[in-house]
Amino acid sequence: MVIPASEKGLLDVLALARKHHVPVTVIGNGTNLLVRDKGIRGLVIKLGNAIKNWQVNGTKITFSSSLSLAQAAHIALEAGLTGMEFAAGIPGSVGGAIYMNAGAYGGEMKNIVTAVTILDRQGQTRNIPAAEMRFGYRTSAVQGTENLILAATVQLQTGDQEKIAAQMADLAERRRSKQPLELPSAGSTFKRPAGNFAGTLIDKAGLKGFAVGDAQVSVKHAGFVVNTGHASCADVLQLISAVQERVFASAGIHLEPEVLIIGEE
Ligand SMILES: Cc1cc2nc3c(=O)[nH]c(=O)nc-3n(C[C@H](O)[C@H](O)[C@H](O)COP(=O)(O)OP(=O)(O)OC[C@H]3O[C@@H](n4cnc5c(N)ncnc54)[C@H](O)[C@@H]3O)c2cc1C
């Protein structure tokens, strides 16, 4: 795994991988990932938190993709700009949030992003307007491509710093009280099915606390699978399948994973 400390370092390592035909997997903070037990072949480039650049331009801010969303939301707060409060408690990076069109509490990246800078695997940089990003529920145009997100520009509004800070504190408290933040997880395990909530369906199927090894349906919030000790990826995958089967049997609804499953089978 390489954690580049600069954009030049990133470009150099990508060029090396290209030259030696080494497969590349790019990750942000890894907060939405379930990595299979055999690991990832080739080179993993972890961008999360490595390159920290941003530029405030009036009510717009351009963030490098490896800033965390918490850092980005605090930069917006410092600049007195509102619109990013929803993102402050999502533990991912700006790049991961663009890739996933991350969202919470009524906000999502799609509503604030105006442009994304990407780097293709040939080393060419391109600016993509938001209209071409095909943002949908936890999807974007970057998925299924080899493009790397370098930066994103968001359009915010002038706001009151005290109100922004209060909103961020309120959302953080709502998260702490409802989500199992005290145990490792990859966030919501399943996507929200139309007109329903995965957590409610899992709870109604009597699966709160249901476990395979140390992988457990959180007793605090059934929408999360947590690791209570030394769960393997195989444990988590088995638990996910069992939950899917039982929810389908009880409610006739197929739950689709929101977590991304990567690595060697
Ligand atoms: C406790 C907890 C709470 C969470 N709450 C929420 C929530 O409220 N809302 C929500 O939407 N999500 C939530 N998540 C999930 C997760 O934080 C988001 O999906 C986040 O956007 C992932 O960012 P990341 O940097 O960790 O991406 P990673 O998990 O590292 O990667 C996710 C995908 O993005 C790709 N990727 C990452 N960075 C780049 C880049 N620079 N260029 C190209 N591709 C890239 C990776 O290849 C991978 O396919 C939560 C997770 C946890 C653990």
Image: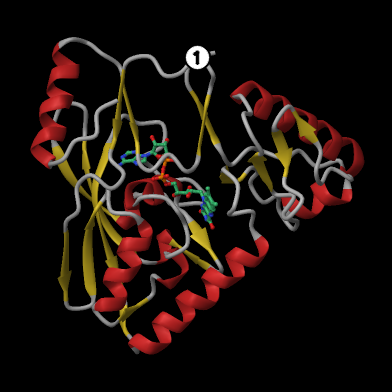
Q: In this view, does 116 lie above or below 30?
A: below
Judged left or right of residue 132, residue 117 is left
Q: In this view, does 169 lie above or below 101?
A: below
Residue at the outermost top position:
20
Q: Is residue 150 above or below residue 111?
A: above
Which one is nearer the viewer's eye here, 88 or 100? 88
Amino acid type, mark 1: Lys
Residue at x 43%, y 72% (from the top left corner):
85
Residue at x 64%, y 58% (from the top left corner):
179
Residue at x 21%, y 61% (from the top left corner):
62
Which one is nearer the viewer's eye here, 214 or 145? 214
Q: Name the residue under label 1.
A: 38
Q: In which quarter of the image is the C terminus?
A: top right
Judged left or right of residue 174, residue 47 is left
Q: In the rendering, at what x and y percent does residue 100 appear?
A: 45, 47
Residue at x 31%, y 77% (from the top left corner):
77
Q: In this view, does 105 lie above or below 12?
A: below
Q: In the rendering, at what x and y percent does residue 136 appear?
A: 49, 51
Judged left or right of residue 133, residue 117 is left
Label 1: state its secondary structure: loop
Q: In the rendering, at what x and y percent does residue 103 appear?
A: 50, 59
Which one is nearer the viewer's eye here, 259 or 107? 259
